[in-house]
Amino acid sequence: MDKIKLVEQEFTNKKLPAINVGDTVKVLTKIPEGDKIRLHPFEGVVIAKKGRGTNASFTVRKVSYGEGTERVFNLYSPNIERIEVTRKGKVKRAKLYYLRAKIGKRATKIEALEA
């Protein structure tokens, strides 16, 4: 058991912001193009988190040109350059799958967390 924790510590020592369900985030991923590596942003609302340790992942949903798009990211993936939290959200659910049925501003409007 200790050997597994040691291996996980090696991969989980990456500095990441605290992201929660309902937050609007911008995830910058590395995309190889020929001999260069380009950063591609994906900005949307975190609708789900699952797993723990090196298996942790989160789902980001955005609506672009009226079409909803979801993408699942592994939290400790080497392809993620950085994660920027654009806006904190205040929600009462662990999973926001109900946003799939919403369209327009209702799909992205989540009350900001008052600090």
Image: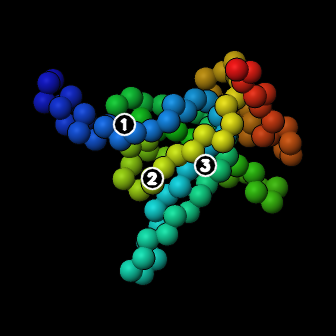
Taking the view exactly as shown, the residue that stands out farthest to the left is 3
Q: Earlier in the sequence, mark 2 or mark 3?
A: 3
Residue shown at the point (70%, 20%) measured from the top left: 115
**Mark 1 Cα shell of 10 Å, populated few (<14), some (14-19), many (≥20):** few
Callout 2, which amino acid?
Ile
Residue shown at the point (80%, 40%) measured from the top left: 107
Camera-near label (2 vs 1) is: 2
Taking the view exactly as shown, the residue that stands out farthest to the front is 115
Residue 13 in the image: above or below residue 43? above
Callout 1, which amino acid?
Asn
Quick one: 115 or 77, which is closer to the camera? Answer: 115
Lateral position of residue 37 relative to residue 86, left or right? left
Rendering colour mode: rainbow
Question: Which residue matches tag 1?
Answer: 55
Res 101 seen here: no
Question: Which residue matches tag 2?
Answer: 80
Residue shown at the point (59%, 58%) measured from the top left: 41
Residue 40 picture quarter:
bottom right
Query: CA–CA distance between discs 2 and 1?
Result: 15 Å
Per the image, label 2 sits on a secondary structure element best described as strand
Point out residue 43 in the picture as x, y percentages from the top left corner: 65, 50
Question: Which residue matches tag 3?
Answer: 26
Res 77 seen here: yes
Q: Earlier in the sequence, mark 2 or mark 1?
A: 1
Taking the view exactly as shown, the residue that stands out farthest to the bottom is 34
